[in-house]
Amino acid sequence: MKSSPAAPRYPNVERDYRVFFWFMTLIIAGMYIWCVSSTPELRQPLRLILFTVLINIHIVLHWFVGYVQNRRWWAIAYVLAQGGMAFVITYLSGTIGMVFALYMALIGEGIGLFGMKLSGLLASGFYLALSLINFIIFTTPAGYIWWLLGTLPTVLFVSLYVTLYNRQADANLRARALLADLETANRQLTEYAARVEDLTIANERQRMARELHDTLSQGLAGLILQLEAADAHLANARLERARGIVQQAMERARATLAEARQAIGDLRAGQLGSANLEESLRREIAHFTETAGIPCDLAITLSSEIPEPQCETVMRAVAETLTNIARHAQAAQASVRLSTDDDSLTVEIYDNGVGFDPDDIPSGHFGLLGLRERVRLAGGKLEIASQPTNGTTVRLKLPLSTMDVES
């Protein structure tokens, strides 16, 4: 019979296993008592001792059959030993009933150990041959007919029972393996969920950092430029001009406050589309020219509809780049170019300022970092071409289909 070290987790299989061997033990014990009581020769001391010892060893080996399973040579030795003891026990008993009591259980065990294969059939044939010899010893050579009539139905029943039992045991083993796999998968899913949660928190922090930079940082930078311009006009006694810039700064402050509230509330700073992208860009460039005093050209050539998320990315990229030009470039001229082809949108922002080294950005400047992250999340590419004293060109290329971003 098949057994498993993990059987306690499946009490039904373990119960079937024990019931089978308890039933077999009771049958053999009953035959022992009947043989001793009905056969005077068995009550002779030496014969009785030998018969009793062999019966007990035979029963004990039955209970330990699980230890020889999957150990081929041990299993072969077990079959030979049990067959030999069954032959001697049956001979000592002098009764035909012991043939069926011992050999039928052994045939079932042989099929259980080796399965319905050649080795299992050989083990069953070995037991059947011994049982036939025992039967003929107690009867006559012609008695094999009665042996066939009594043995074949019993062998058929035992073979079917053991085969069905093995299938049930195999099914439970597969169920146990599946359960272990499910437990492993569940543990992995729990670990993955924790990782996803950590990544989600990290991405949310990065997103909020970009939103705060794109609102508060850019807004405050614009306010500083306006206040510096107003201060310069006041120093030159141009009061009306200074007052106009202060009013613009107040409007800018209100707009920055509104955008900051939208960012904190996890809202977008505007629902942009192709229809009003050009208008928004012109307002942004006009504000840049007014505050920084740097002329900026805008050229837009759009042949396709631009998805709303890409419009948002374009606006943030242009605003960030113009802010950097106003603060660092010392440029006399700037330009913004938008164009589309079959499947992508290209944005180029140029200035003729002092330039910089894109690979050597001082710490504490997060504008380009946030811009790179925003473009990457939009599925695009960002290129910065700049050298000291030779100006800067910021070029980003975005897919026009949001499906490209998701894939």
Image (cartoon, rainbow, N blue to C red):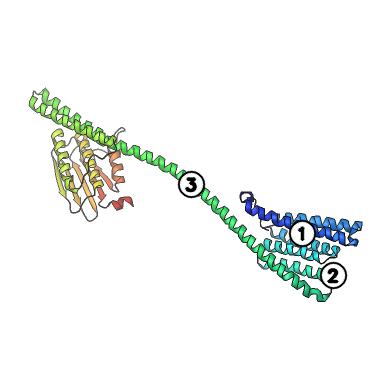
Residue 361, horizontal then vertical, whole percent: 29, 36
Q: Amino acid at mark 2?
A: Phe
User: Gap between marks 3 and 1, in whole Å?
Assistant: 51 Å
Q: In the displayed structure, would residue 163 be above or below residue 9?
A: below
Q: Which residue is at 66% across, 53% downward?
A: 15
Determine which quarter of the picture holds residue 33. bottom right
Cβ–Cβ below 8 Å for labels 3 and 1? no
Q: How many residues crowd around disc 1 within 10 Å: few (fewer than 14), some, or many (20 or more)? A: some
Q: Which residue is mark 2?
A: 138
Determine which quarter of the picture holds residue 232. top left
Q: Amino acid at mark 3?
A: Gln
Q: Is residue 209 left or right of residue 27?
A: left
Q: Which residue is mark 3?
A: 188
Q: Amino acid at mark 1?
A: Ile
Q: Is residue 381 left or right of residue 7?
A: left
Q: Which residue is mark 1?
A: 27
Residue 243, horizontal then vertical, whole percent: 11, 26
Q: In the displayed structure, would residue 306 be above or below residue 253?
A: below
Residue 213, horizontal then vertical, whole percent: 27, 35
Residue 405 - label? none
State the quadrant of the N terminus. bottom right
Q: Which residue is at 15% across, 39% downward?
A: 283
Residue closest to the eye, 347 or 400 = 400
Residue closest to the eye, 171 or 41 = 41
